[in-house]
Amino acid sequence: MNNVSTFGFNVYSDSLKGIHLNSFETQTLNTISPNSYGISTKDPLFEKALKASNYLVLDGVYFALASIFTNGRNIKKNQGLDVFDFFIHKMNSENGRVFFLGTSIETLKKIQTRLNREYPNILAEYLSPPFKNEFTCSENEKMIEKINKFNPDIVFVGMTCPKQEKWSYLNKNQINTKLICSIGAVFDWYAGNQKDIHPLWWKLRLGWLKRTIDRPEILKRYPNIGIFFWHLFLAIIGIKKYKYSEI
């Protein structure tokens, strides 16, 4: 596996084709970005969930700056959209089963309509969990029971960061699936709730700016993003050092 150790995180830096699904264990795939890094510095459980990922992929390009400046290595970008697109095509070609956990019932219905139209070979099930910070034991049991009854190949979780990653980490061993993907905002994108960003913005590496213009609430993330760039500055001048330790 081609991984790059960066700021204490082991980030997958290869083609998504290198991710193999098997029936022997439930694997988790999460994404890392400056925002999620910043959150992890204040949330130990979230940090543990990210570090325990079977595959931690680069969401966007800016977290890769940490590796470029401290290791001299770039990291291959595999954003949430890339992950979803790759695995949904894979499931369609293999007549697979997928489960969507998260978001509202209205958004799930939009996802269902589009999925039925574009990927007719996929069998899918959906569940909108309660909108709350923490689930009760009873709520968790019902969610896990419904997933296991369907027995999906892949579970896509869209409950926003860091809730989705922590939920997947805490419940992974009780879920009968091959892969749990925490891809949050992709649910809204695929449902058509968010406008597509013109490729030119991504080419100019200004996709973040267009997203902020379209969704001003993203400004709330900037303090967490600021933590990443502050730590990057400290690492560049040699004040802050990181050593990866496997969990």
Image (cartoon, rainbow, N blue to C red):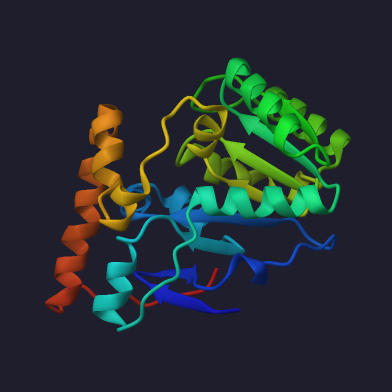
Q: Quadrant of the N terminus?
A: bottom right
Residue at the far left: name it: 237
Residue 207 location (% of width, % of height) = 30, 47
Asked if residue 237 lies left or right of residue 138, the reply is: left
Q: Residue furthest top?
A: 106
The residue shown at (88%, 34%) is 149
Give the tally of numbered discs. 0
Q: In which quarter of the image is residue 211?
A: top left
The image shows residue 152 at horizontal and vertical percentages of 81, 43
Which residue is nearer to you in this view: 201 or 109? 201
Q: Nearer the viewer, residue 209 or 163?
A: 209
* x and y, in percent, of residue 153 in the image: 80, 49
The quarter of the rendered structure image containing the C terminus is: bottom right
Q: In this view, does 17 lie above or below 41?
A: below
Q: In the drawing, does residue 82 fall left or right of residue 232?
A: right
Can you see residue 169? no
Q: Can residue 109 be spotted in the picture?
A: yes
- Say which residue appears at 16% left-offset and 59% top-offset: 230
Residue 243 x %, y %: 37, 77
Residue drawn at x 46%, y 75% as measured from the top left: 245
